Structure formats: C-alpha cells, structure tokens
C-alpha cells in the first residue's frame, strides 16, 4: 500500500480501467450479437409442444415450486467454504515467488487441512447422491 | 470532474438502485439477482479505488458463492410466494426506527467531523503486494482460518445429517 500523489483522480489504474472497459464492451457486444442473430434467424412457429419447458426430453409433471432437497443446500455450503479457501490460495499464488519456501510451507499446511476436510466429507457420504446415498 | 468521478457516481447510482430494487422485490429470486448486480457494482468500485484483488474476491465470494447459498435458501424455504406482505406490520416499526436512527447518526458523524470535507488519499494495493503482506505478517491467522473452515465443513455435514435422520428412521446409528 503506497499513497498516490495525484489530485483530481480516484485511482491509479488508468490503463487497467481502459482495457477492462474495452473488454467489457466487447463481451457485451458479442452477447448482444449472438442473441440478436439467434432471434433474427430462428424459426418462430409456435405450438404447445415447442413451448413446453424442456426437461431433458421428459414431459414435465407437477409444479416447479417444490422444496429443494437438503443435499443440494449441503453442496452449496461446501462450495462456499471451498471458495473461501480458494481465495486464500489465490492470494498466495499471486505472490508465490516473493514468498519463497516459507510461503510454500504455509500454503501446504493450509491445503492439507483443506484436503482433510474434503476426505472427511467424502468418507462420511456428504457427496453421495441419489440411490447410492440411500444404501448407507 | 474527471472521468473517474463520473464513473464513481455512475457506479454509486447503480449500486443504490440495484440494492433498493433488491430489498423491495416480492419475488425473492429477483431480489437475489438484483443483489448480484449490486455486488458487481461494489466490485467495480473497489477496482476504481485501486484494490483490484479485493474486487476479484468480491465477485468470486459474494456474487458467486454467497449468492448461490442465498438462492438455495430461497428455493428451500419459500415454496409459494403469494402476494402476502414479507413481514407483519409490527416488525416494520422497529425496523423503521433503526433505519432513521442510523440515518441521523450517520449525518451527525459526517457533519460533526471537521475532516469530513477532505478528500481521502488514494492508495494502491497491488495484488502481489497484498498476497505477500498477508502471508508474511498474518500466516498464523491463515492456518487458523483453515482449521476454522475444516470445522465449518464438518459442522455443515453434521447439521444436514441430523436434519435428515428423523425422516428416515430405518437407518441405524452409523456415527
């Protein structure tokens, strides 16, 4: 963190802002062009079969507003936790050269603890799904 | 008024509008989507202030993982969102009182502080320097965080197991 001496500007990331803006505009233009081409060239003859929600080729039954089973939520929680761990690994990875072997040891311990958690939930069947989960 | 000030005000308006939309939507899924836009705006604000790594983390963790969690909570709890009021009227009064109190206190702090009119010094936090800083000065905290997250993983698994057990009584006690 070093203070910047420049009046009248908020940030020192001028080139970054510029390229990010260009990139964002290009991505937006690409998305809009794809959507427009699909809309323009696409066939628009509607019938009830076509307008039915697509559910992997199976005719949908019942209402869509059902309670989601708990395992989905569990996976979301695991995703959140491992995502936070990934954030620390990113912050190590962008400075790994400067941190050297001590940083390597620290992040190794961190990753080993992370893998222990993964092994634990794997063994306990936290990642089991569908019919295999019921056998347990 | 530089280009950065213009970007700043645009982003502020974007964040305020999307947050206001998020807290007023009846449909919870729409509210979550607006909140994602609000987080993207905050990320761009961080980037503008010279903290690109924080911006990336904001997108990865808040707009990514936490919003997925919110979405699942909405889908698990709200089976049918009718036109009913989200909170009963008796809960609106304390909420309004707290909101007005915050507003008054915030304005009071800004007005009473003599330094509130000075522009803040801009600073640069390079991603590499940030990583180096936390791993050199706070590596012990990071190891403790890893243990904390391990406990969180195990706790989440146990809680989900416990909530599942009453529905399936034939399962023997298998730890």
Image (cartoon, grey):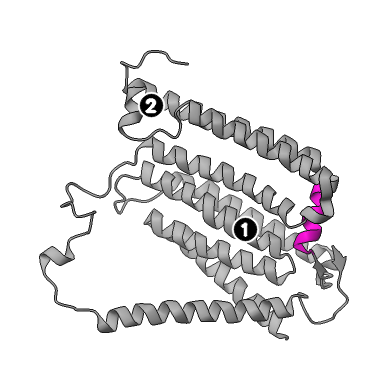
User: Is A98 placed left or right of A91 in the picture?
Assistant: right
**Residue drawn at 75 percent across, 69 percent down:** B50
Circle 1 is placed at which residue position? B58
Circle 2 is placed at which residue position? B164
Residue B54 picture quarter: bottom right
**Residue drawn at 46 percent across, 82 percent down:** A29
**Residue drawn at 40 percent across, 41 percent down:** A72
Residue B155 picture quarter: top right
Image coordinates of residue B173 in percent, x first then y, are 41, 13
Can I make out residue B42 in this image? yes
State the CA–CA distance, disc 1 to disc 2.
33 Å
Is A97 above or below relative to B121?
Answer: above
Q: What stretch is highlighted in magenta?
A: B125-135
Check if mark 1 and mark 2 are on a common chain. yes
Majority secondary structure of the magenta segment?
helix
Badge 1 element? helix
Is A127 above or below relative to A60?
Answer: above
């Amino acid at each position: 963190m070093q203070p910047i001496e420049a009046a009248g500007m908020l940030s020192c990331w001028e080139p970054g802002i510029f390229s990010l803006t260009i990139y964002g505009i290009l991505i937006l233009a690409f998305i809009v062009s794809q959507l427009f081409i699909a809309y323009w060239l696409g066939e628009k003859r509607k019938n009830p079969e076509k307008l039915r929600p697509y559910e992997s080729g199976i005719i949908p039954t019942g209402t869509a507003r059902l309670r989601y089973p708990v395992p989905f939520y569990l996976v979301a929680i695991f995703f959140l936790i491992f995502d936070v761990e990934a954030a620390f690994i990113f912050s190590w990875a962008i400075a790994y050269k400067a941190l050297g072997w001590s940083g390597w040891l620290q992040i190794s311990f961190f990753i080993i603890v992370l893998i222990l958690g993964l092994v634990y939930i794997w063994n306990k069947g936290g990642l089991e799904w569908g019919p295999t989960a019921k056998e347990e | 008024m530089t280009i950065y000030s213009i970007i700043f005000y645009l982003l502020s308006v974007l964040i305020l509008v999307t947050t206001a939309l998020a807290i007023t939507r009846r449909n919870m899924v729409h509210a979550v989507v607006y909140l994602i836009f609000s987080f993207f705006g905050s990320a761009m604000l961080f980037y503008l202030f010279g903290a690109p790594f924080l911006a990336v983390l904001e997108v990865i963790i808040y707009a990514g993982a936490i919003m997925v969690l919110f979405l699942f909570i909405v889908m698990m709890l709200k089976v049918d969102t009718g036109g009913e009021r989200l909170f009963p009227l008796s809960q609106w009064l304390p909420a309004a009182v707290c909101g007005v109190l915050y507003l008054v206190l915030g304005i009071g702090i800004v007005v009473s502080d003599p330094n509130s009119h000075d522009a803040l010094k801009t600073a640069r936090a390079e991603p590499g320097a940030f990583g180096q800083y936390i791993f050199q000065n706070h590596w012990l905290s990071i190891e403790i965080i890893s243990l904390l997250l391990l406990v969180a993983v195990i706790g989440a698994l146990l809680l989900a197991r416990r909530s599942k057990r009453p529905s399936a009584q034939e399962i023997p006690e298998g730890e």
